[in-house]
Image (cartoon, rainbow, N blue to C red):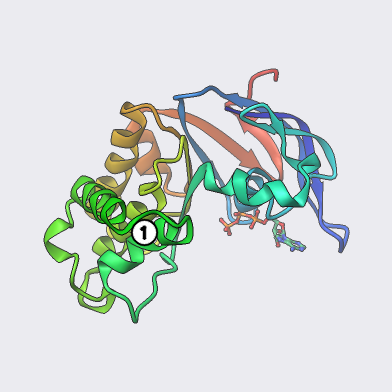
C-alpha cells in the first residue's frame, strides 16, 4: 500500500529531513512511526499525502508514484486516505455530527447517506449520543475521537495519524491507539506517527524508527 524506495527529502532551505528511507507497508498492515523530535516523522507523512514531494527516490501509494501525480489527481489521492492530526482541526461552530459529515458533504453524497455513514462512524468511536453537541462541550479525548470519525467516515483504505495522542493522558492515549487497531482489524492500512515509545511498545505492532532522517529500525529492502 505504501512503498518508499531510497527516499530523501531536502527542504528548500537546504535542510535534509529524510535520507534514503526504504520500507514497505503492505495493504491491510499496521505500523507505528517513531523517533525524536525533528527526526522526520511529519515529513514522511507529508510525502504520502503529497503535501510535500520527495527530492530523491520514489514514494508509491497503492501503486501510484505520488510525486509524479498530476495536480488534478491529488484530491483523489487524498480522498483515498483518512488523516488524523494532533490538534483535531475541528470546526468549533459546528456540531459533532456536522464536523464528521464534512468529507461526505464535500463529496456531494445524498442527505440520507450522509446521516447513515456519520452515525456509523460516530458509533464506531463511541460518540453516537453526543452528535448534537459542539466540540467545546467534549473532553480532549472525545474531540480526538470526533477527528478519527471524520477521518474514517468516507471509508478510506488508508488511515494516517500524526501524533494523535499528543495532548492526552496515558489511559486515553491507549484508548485512541486501540481504535486504530480496530480499524486495522477490519482491513484498513494504518500508519501512526507518535513519539510515545512506552505506548507503542505496549501495542506490539511493527515499529519504524527514524533518527535524524534515517530509518534506524523497521525498514525492509523495498
Ligand atoms: N518546510 C520546512 N522547511 C525547512 N525545514 C523543515 C520544514 N519542515 C520541517 N523541517 C525540518 O525538518 C526536520 C524534520 O521535521 P518533522 O516535522 O518531519 O519532524 P518530526 O519527527 O515530525 O518532529 P516532531 O516530533 O517534533 O513533530 C526538522 O528539523 C524541521 O525543522
Residue found at x 62% / y 51%: 75
**Residue 115 vs residue 43: left or right?**
left
Residue found at x 35% / y 78%: 92
Question: Considering depth in this image, is 207 or 152 the residue closer to the camera?
Answer: 152
Identify the image quadrant of residue 178.
top left
The answer to whether any part of residue 45 appears in the image is no
**Residue 42 vs residue 175: left or right?**
right
* Disc 1 Cβ-to-ligand 1 distance below 8 Å: no
Q: Residues within 10 Å of mark 1 (few under 14, many from 20)?
A: many
Q: Does residue 103 sit above or below 82 in this rendering? A: below
Instruction: Indicate the secondary structure of the residue bearing disc 1.
Output: helix
Query: Ligand 1 appears in which quadrant?
Result: bottom right
Identify the image quadrant of residue 184.
top left
Q: Does residue 204 sit above or below 96 in this rendering? A: above
Residue 7 at what x, y percent from top left? 77, 36
Q: Does residue 181 sit above or below 102 in this rendering? A: above
Residue 109 at what x, y percent from top left? 39, 54
Residue 77 at what x, y percent from top left? 61, 44
Amino acid at each position: 500500500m505504501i512503498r518508499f524506495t531510497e527516499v530523501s527529502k531536502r527542504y528548500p532551505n537546504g535542510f535534509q529531513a529524510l535520507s534514503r528511507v526504504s520500507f514497505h507497508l503492505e495493504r491491510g498492515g499496521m505500523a507505528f512511526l517513531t523517533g525524536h523530535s525533528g527526526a522526520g516523522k511529519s515529513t514522511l507523512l507529508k510525502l504520502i499525502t503529497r503535501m510535500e514531494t520527495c527530492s530523491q527516490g520514489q514514494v508509491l501509494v497503492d501503486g501510484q508514484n505520488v510525486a509524479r501525480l498530476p495536480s488534478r489527481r491529488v484530491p483523489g489521492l487524498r480522498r483515498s486516505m483518512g488523516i488524523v492530526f494532533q490538534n483535531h482541526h475541528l470546526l468549533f461552530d459546528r456540531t459533532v455530527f456536522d464536523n464528521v459529515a464534512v468529507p461526505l458533504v464535500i463529496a456531494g453524497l445524498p442527505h440520507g447517506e450522509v446521516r447513515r455513514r456519520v452515525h456509523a462512524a460516530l458509533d464506531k468511536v463511541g460518540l453516537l449520543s453526543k452528535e448534537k453537541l459542539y466540540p467545546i462541550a467534549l473532553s480532549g479525548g472525545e474531540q480526538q475521537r470526533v477527528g478519527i470519525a471524520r477521518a474514517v467516515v468516507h471509508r478510506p483504505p488508508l488511515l494516517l495519524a500524526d501524533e494523535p495522542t499528543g495532548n492526552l493522558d496515558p489511559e486515553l492515549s491507549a484508548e485512541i491507539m486501540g481504535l486504530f487497531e480496530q480499524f486495522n482489524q477490519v482491513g484498513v492500512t494504518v500508519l501512526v506517527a507518535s513519539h510515545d515509545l512506552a505506548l507503542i511498545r505496549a501495542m506490539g505492532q511493527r515499529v519504524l524508527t527514524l533518527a535524524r532522517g534515517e530509518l534506524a529500525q523497521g525498514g525492509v529492502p523495498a
